């Protein structure tokens, strides 16, 4: 039997050395250089699920969080994002979380989706950009998540330059961690990020006839 103290000393010396060096070099970074830009993207399920988990972790650590959602609005009665109920409850008991949902209703009464953009969709996307700019410049958050901001470019609601301008603005105001999500990267975007994770569909239950379900998918 190997005791825990013996196990701690065994193997992985190169990796241990790398971890120690990283920890020491991190201590010498400026506060601005410690802030990173994340991208979670792809056509697989899990991007918003991922950032909601990140929100839980940040709040658990005592950080303040702001979330801006693009193209995820609703008509005022049937909200399709159960996670927002959780965020409201967390806010009501003192956790420093605020969210801003922009966009128009996409779900049709028969459960299908509306894909064509309307004038109101474009206006809402611009409103989301305005909120994001204000938070980058004036916000006091430790973590800012711009959910579906990259997707808004792919679906032609906003121009990619507008997202790149947000990133450039953040680089001038690196007081917090920045996160964006979406479906597809464009040339040059990868170079701007510190962390990129791709959600790739390997298998999905929709293909065998299981639709989206409350509490699991929304």
Image: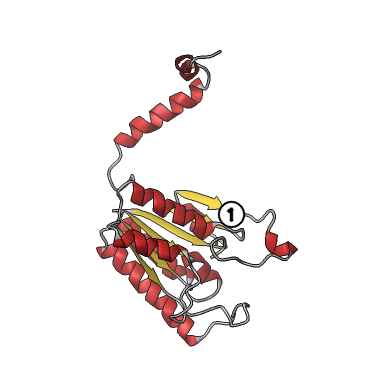
* Residue, disc 1: 199
Could you tell me how many numbered marks the image carries? 1
| Front one among 156 and 1 | 1
User: Can residue 35 be seen at all in this image of the molecule?
Assistant: no
Left or right of 184? Residue 91 is: left
Quarter assignment of residue 127: bottom left
Vertical comparison of 217 with 27: above or below: below
| Front one among 158 and 45 | 45
The quarter of the image holding the N terminus is top right
| Front one among 137 and 48 | 48
Image point (68%, 58%), residue name: 204
Q: Which structural element holds mark 1?
A: loop
Crowd tier of the residue under label 1, counting other residues whose Cα lies within 10 Å: few below 14, some 14–19, many 20 or above? some
Tell me where residue 60 appears, x and y as whole percent. 35, 48
Left or right of 209? Residue 84 is: left
Tell me where residue 115 appears, x and y as whole percent. 59, 79
How is this picture coloured? Answer: secondary structure
User: Can residue 62 be seen at all in this image of the molecule?
Assistant: yes
| Front one among 178 and 86 | 86
Tell me where residue 56 appears, x and y as whole percent. 40, 52
Tell me where residue 135 appears, x and y as whole percent. 30, 65
Image point (42%, 79%), residue name: 124
Image point (54%, 60%), residue name: 187
Taking the view exactly as shown, the residue that stands out farthest to the bottom is 119
Image point (33%, 46%), residue name: 61
């Amino acid at each position: 039997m190997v005791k825990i103290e013996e196990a701690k000393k065994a193997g992985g010396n190169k990796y241990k050395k790398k971890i120690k060096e990283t920890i020491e070099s991190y201590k010498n970074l400026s506060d601005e250089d410690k802030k990173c830009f994340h991208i979670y993207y792809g056509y697989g399920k899990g991007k918003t699920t991922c950032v909601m988990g990140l929100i839980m972790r940040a709040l658990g650590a005592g950080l303040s969080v702001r979330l801006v959602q693009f193209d995820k609005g609703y008509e005022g009665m049937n909200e399709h994002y159960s996670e927002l109920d959780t965020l409201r409850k967390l806010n009501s008991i003192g956790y420093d979380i605020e969210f801003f949902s922009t966009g128009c209703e996409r779900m049709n009464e028969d459960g299908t989706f509306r894909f064509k953009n309307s004038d109101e969709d474009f206006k809402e996307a611009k409103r989301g950009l305005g909120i994001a700019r204000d938070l980058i410049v004036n916000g006091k958050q430790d973590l800012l998540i711009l959910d579906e901001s990259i997707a808004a470019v792919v679906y032609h609601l906003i121009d990619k330059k507008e997202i790149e301008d947000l990133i450039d603005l953040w680089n001038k105001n690196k007081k917090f961690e920045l996160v964006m999500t979406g479906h597809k990267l464009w040339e040059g975007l990868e170079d701007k990020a510190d962390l990129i994770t791709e959600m790739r569909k390997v298998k999905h239950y929709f293909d065998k006839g299981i639709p989206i379900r409350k509490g699991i998918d929304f």
